[in-house]
Every structure is written in structure tokens, then in C-alpha cells.
Image: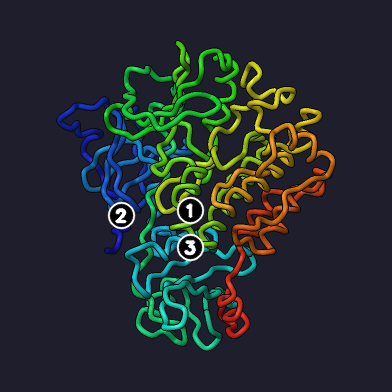
Amino acid sequence: MRMRKESVRCSHRWTPRSNTPEPVTPSTPSRGGRIVVAMYSFQGRSSGELSFDKGDKMEIINDADADWWLARHMTRCTEGYIPKNYVASASSLECQDWYFSKIARKEAEKLLMTQGNLRGTFLIRMSEQSSHGYSLSIRDWDQNKGEHVKHYRIKVTDTGGYFITSSQAFRTLNDLVDAYKKNNYGLACLLQYPCPRPQPQKWDLSRETKDQWEIDRSVLSMDKKLGHGSFGEVWYGMWNNSTEVAIKTLKQGAMSPSAFLEEARIMKKLRHRNILVLYAVCTKEEPILIVTEYMCNGALLDLLRNEGERTLKLNDLIYVATQVAAGMAYLESLQLLHRDLAARNVLVGDSLLCKVADFGLARIVEGEDYCPSTCNKFPVKWTAPEAMLYNRFTIKSDVWSFGVLLMEVITFGANPYPGMTNREVAESVPNGYRMGKPANHYCPDYVHEIICKCWNVDPAKRPTFSYLSDLLGNLDIASEQFYAESSEAFS
């Protein structure tokens, strides 16, 4: 469907619906404003938000906010706020269903291998090495390897064209895709179906709660207790009877409301697909409530122990570790610490999507629960020696914890330092003791090497999370390495 170039002029500014929402703040129409296309459908959740369907076109009136844009629907001539990450510029590559921009290789593989996708399902993504332009990823099948994903590097000509093999060059990526839908020109198979996109992240309960995220607890329902941890209970519930949420109730006296609010201000601003989203808080009475997005598969530790050996393969475990490293690399880039990184504090959603949770809470907890001088409740087995001995927490002490988390992942949730008490660990690790390669679980040498690097006694010699994220995200299986050596097109 081609976009009309001229913008639609509206005879009125707001058409109220049956529930009569409040009109948005008046704005001056911008002639020839930027046109965007909806990549997903969106149902407004509060007054002033504009609902739309996938494929709808809207004119942007105000894009000053990082998350919510004021827009005019070009068919209905209504105005409202729309989530920025639900739309793409009509003239951009992002509006193509097959273009996934900056996603990692392993993320592309996970999306393509989702149940229901057929041979020939494909996507194009930016190559993880910026000098390599783009990569084409296709779901394929053959008798020897079964279902698998193949990756091809898309190179750029001196004149700005695109090619996979030097014998076939195309003016645009659209032309390349159209051509390979008709003739595979040596690829594994024809391009058939754009890979279905996962729903975009919702950063707020509504536009109204983006900045006013101290909410009244009366709009929350606590329907099912999910568990409890170091800081309190966790419940499944609903906000406004419309949005699934998780609600953490902090133990009374666990932390002061003022200290928590200061930390929550940082947490609310975090924007990464592998960091749990903080939606809102209730701090005006005890217990303090933390309202976050709901992750349907719960804690990673429980998933590893209950289903891991039955359902998860090595590639899945590496995918989990890659996501945790990516989330921590984001915190690292902001110079933020977690202080309690462990499988119990990683949550899992659909399609094995993992998010680091409970960021920052260990720093402001009060009392003795997290005091290094008492080994009973302090997470000794996940804590770096310099943090145990001198209370010296840095991003490199989080890297140490990541090494322990990797051991949890590869052993499907086994307790670290089996057979040792917290006190024995606290005495042995600073003197050089390290866990060996697990005897009862398959742990490739390269995984154990990564773990050992995280446990270097010198924090400065431990890898960065940025390095770990890139390393884990680019691990290749043997068949792919063979194909890379036998084809100039492989990326």
C-alpha cells in the first residue's frame, strides 16, 4: 500500500469517543509534518492516548518527548499521544516488516526458530560489526541439520548499492529482497515470509504515569502470590483492571521511603530490553509497593531447576547468558551497579526473554540482611572477594557475580559451591579457591574459560560486560563455522 505524499488536513482537532476522554493539549498543526506508519496495533490506556491499528498512517505534531509523540491520525483526523516505539517513519527502512535494525545474531536466530515459522522466514538486521553493513538471516531446513538459521552478509558497493554475491547487485535493500523472493541466486532457499515481530516494550503503564509514577494503591489488584525473596513478597496483579503487572511488597522497615524513591528515580529511567521495567511505586504507606512489568515464566532460577534439563539446550543457555550480559552492559555504560546479580534475580518472559531485576535494591536495604559481617543472609556465594572483605562494590564485582550466574545456568540451577557453607566460601575464596568445571553437567571449555575470567582475583583483569555481551552473542555452532569458511556470503 503506497503512501499518499500530501498530508491530510483535518476539519477538527478531537473526536471524542463514547467514554469521552479528555482532549489533548491544543497544538498548532504542522503542514507537511513527518508521516509515520504503525508497525503494531495500539489500544490507548488513558485519556489523551491515540489508538491505532497496524498499517495506519499518522502525522507527527510534536516529538519532543523521548517516549510519547503527539500525532494526528490521517484517516480519522483525531489527535492523541502515541508510543514512539510502535511506529516508523513512512520513508524509512524501519517501516519494512522484514527489517529488524540492531538485533544480535543470537536474537535473530531465536526469533526465526520460534515455533510456527516456516522455511524461508527471514529478516534483515544491521551487522554487529558496523563496517559490514547488513546481514540477512533465513530459517532453512535440510535432511542433515534439520531446522536451522543461515546468515548472509549484505555488502555495499562503492556507489551505494547492495549485494550478497558479487554477480548480483541491487540499488536498494527493497530491490534485493524482491529479487530473492523470486530467485534464490545461490542462497539456501527463496525468501518467503518476513519474520513476525515481537510486541514492542511498554515503558509506562500509560502516558500519565511516565512522570507521575507514584500511584494510588487502590488502582492495583493483588490476585496471586508468586513468591517471596530477600526484600519481600511478589504478587501477580492488574493495574486499572487492564494491564498485567507484578507487585513487590517490601518488608516493613527494609528501607526508608526517601532512600527508595531516590533509587527508583534511576530505575524508572532505564530503557533496555534486558532490564526489568519499573512502572510505578506506592510509598505513602507501608508496605512500599514496587509495580513492574509481569514476566510470565518467573525467576530464571526456578525455570532452570524445574524445566531446564528437559527443555533447554546449550544454545538456549548461551542465549540466556547473552541477554543477562547485554542488560548488565547497559548498566555498565551508565556506571550503575547491581550488587545482587544471580539467577534468582533474573526474570523470564515469553520466548526465553530474560530481564535483570531487583537492580539497586541491595544498595539501600537497611538492617543486617545484606551486611558482609553476617554470612547468614548476605549472598556470599555470589559476592566478589573484595566486596566480602572490604565492602568494595564496583561493576567488576558484578562481573564476578555474573561468573557465578553462568555456573548456575550451565548446571540448570545447581547451588554454587556444592557442599560448602557460606562461612567456608567466605574463608576459601579470598585465599584463591574457585569452583571447578561441573562434573555432572556438560560445560564446554569455552564457557568455563569465560567463567574463570570473571573470577580473576584482580578486578581490573576481569572482562567488561560489553566484552562478555559481544563474546557470548557471537558464539557460533560448528556447522555455521564450516559454512563461513565455504561461502563468501556468510556473515
Q: Nearer the viewer, mark 1 or mark 3?
A: 1
Alpha carbons under labels 1 and 2: distance apart: 55 Å
Report, in whole angstroms, how far the alpha carbon at label 1 lies from the one at label 3: 22 Å
Q: Amino acid at mark 3?
A: Ala
User: Looking at the image, which residue is at 26% across and 25% down?
Assistant: 22
Which of the two marks, 2 or 3, is nearer to us in this view?
Answer: 3
At 45% across and 25% down in the image, what residue appears?
233
Relative to 91, is 147 above or below? below
Q: Secondary structure beneath disc 2?
A: loop
- Residue under numbered circle 3: 108
What's under tag 2, amino acid-wise?
Answer: Glu
Vertical order, 231 against 321 (above or below): above
Q: Nearer the viewer, residue 345 or 21?
A: 345
Residue 272 seen by the camera: no
* Residue position marked by numbered label 1 in the rendering: 308
At label 1, which amino acid type do we have?
Gly
Question: Reading the chain from its start, which is encountered first: label 1 or label 2?
Answer: 2
